[in-house]
Image (cartoon, grey):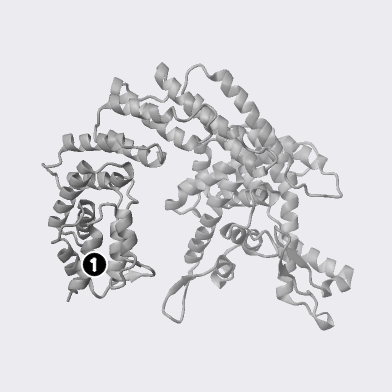
Amino acid sequence: MVSNLLIDRLVNILREKDFNIAAQELENITDLDSFGSENFLHDIILERWVYRPEDVPFTFARDIWQSSSKVEDNRALLKEVLQYPIADINRAKINDFLWVAEKDFSAAKSAEKYYRAHVESTEGFDFNFMAINRLVFLAKKLSSKETDDTIRKKLLIKVMDQYDNEDHGRILYLIQTAMYEKVDTDYLIQYTEKILNTYDDQSYDFYIIGEFCDVLEQLYYTKNKWQKKRCVSEPKLIEIRRRKAQAILTAERTLNEQNAGNLMRSVHLLKDVVNILKTITGTEAERKEILKKIDAIEKKMISEMPVFSAKHDNSETVKQLIRQLEVLDKEEALCYFASFIPLPEKSRIEESVTKSADAIGFGGLFPVGILGKDGKSIAKSRPIKKSGDEIDSAAFQESVERRASEFMGYFSQIMIGNTLHYIRSKFKVEEKDIREIVENSIIVPEDRREAYVKGLMAGFSGDFLIALSILVPQVENSVRELALECGEPVYNLNEDGIEEIKTMHAVLELDGVREHLDEDFLLALKTVFCSKFGFNMRNDIAHGLLSDKQFQSFRALYTWWFILKICYMFCGKLQVENRIKVNDKLRKLFEGKNEDCVPDA
């Protein structure tokens, strides 16, 4: 039974036209279903996070409503409140809530009626922004004759004229809604240009400026009935696109070039400018200058990678590598890069670890501390040898993974880095080249192909932050799919009957996976993705432990290359055919000479 005292208190509060004040007073009502300090009616009245007509309101209130054991009482309370004279906006929101939560058609009609009454009688953009969006949605949803398209246009203009230049994000959404509602194009052009003119030429808020430029361009297309095209010659469209490019360039100039992360952002922003200028005729010279700047920044990024220190002169190895690459075309060079550079051999690394322990003697008796990216201790290897020279197998595996990571760092700098640099300087790696690899690779699930393509392409452009952020989670998923193909479950059932997904490390330890995967490949997967004694990339990326600069390390480069190699390893016919072509060319290169080709990986 609804308390008359409660009804009286609510009605007195809801007579207030300012919904902010009403919502504040509703916070003191303790007799309503709530979550924490907020009750459902407070959330209904305060609702203002509706930026577009299609946005669904009252999320928090609906959660409280649906989880309540007193839905019938709550419904009766709202119905009772609606019988009294309360403010139009509050009446509209309560009815709207009953429509959204209960699909009450009559409530939807009432919500439309009172939203309209509120907008027509109320001044103030903040007070009307949510109301006009819900009014547009409900009127169209109900095919309303009372609030037809003419009325909607009139009210949209009314609200837009109330805009106080405080929140450009909200007015951008409202302009877009007005476009869809076919509000007068000349009015919208003048309105949008007025907003854009509030930004001077030195403004670097390129995202919002770009959004307004896109809207303005669309309005001019509509006004002049121009056919949309990628490359424009119309002076007005050129002016708009140059305005967008100028904002991006201004933002790029504000970045501190001493920061590795800012160098990456500079490249991204400058490439965006180049892509815009490509759509404007006669900008070839400008694009060339920007591309020169991009090239200089990318070289700076590479030069600032931490360098692997080796006692041996590897210049001859690099010369031989380049000599082999020079006889290959683009498809063959990609095959060489992904397939011919080998993974560390587990047997050789185990032999190396064993020799080190024997040669040093007491060295194998003491643990080695592993430091994280910020210098904190994240792991400590156990002594390889127990008493009586007995080998601790788990500690031995840890040392193998640590030694494997050292080999990987070496290969990344000497082989992988130089090969990638050659391919990028000699060929233009296009999306279609990578898509062919991804679509032929059976380890890439069909519904994950786009992620792999985008991640691999980002790596070829030198952006390993984007590349690994996309690719590492996808590799973990591919490993789970691989385990399923090996007949192993990838979920654990906990004591509460909840199925929890196994970690990547646990999946790689499954018997079926160990039996079906090559031991070198299995070691590489563990070392790169989930070993604290290796790169541990899955953990570091998942938990946000890598800084922008660390994404430009040789470890990051190796991880990206290894993912490319994984894709290529499972390409079947495509890999076989290209390996044959590469082997034939390398044999011809070395014919008559006492040299060996790079062995098959």
Residue in the picture at 58% in, 60% down: 543
Query: Considering only vertical position in the picture, is 248 above or below 406?
Result: above
Amino acid marked by disc 1: Arg
Residue in the picture at 19% in, 57% down: 86
Query: Considering only vertical position in the picture, is 349 above or below 167?
Result: below
Q: Quadrant of residue 594?
A: top right
Residue in the picture at 22% in, 58% down: 94
Q: Quadrant of residue 103?
A: bottom left
Image coordinates of residue 6 in percent, x first then y, are: 22, 71
Q: Nearer the viewer, residue 78 or 242?
A: 78
Q: Quadrant of the N terminus?
A: bottom left
Residue in the picture at 23% in, 74% down: 70
Badge 1 local density, few (<14 within 10 Å), some, or many (20+)? few
In the image, taking residue 198 as reference, residue 62 lies left or right, namely left
In the image, taking residue 454 as reference, residue 312 lies left or right, namely right
Image coordinates of residue 194 in percent, x first then y, are: 39, 27
Residue position marked by numbered label 1 in the rendering = 9
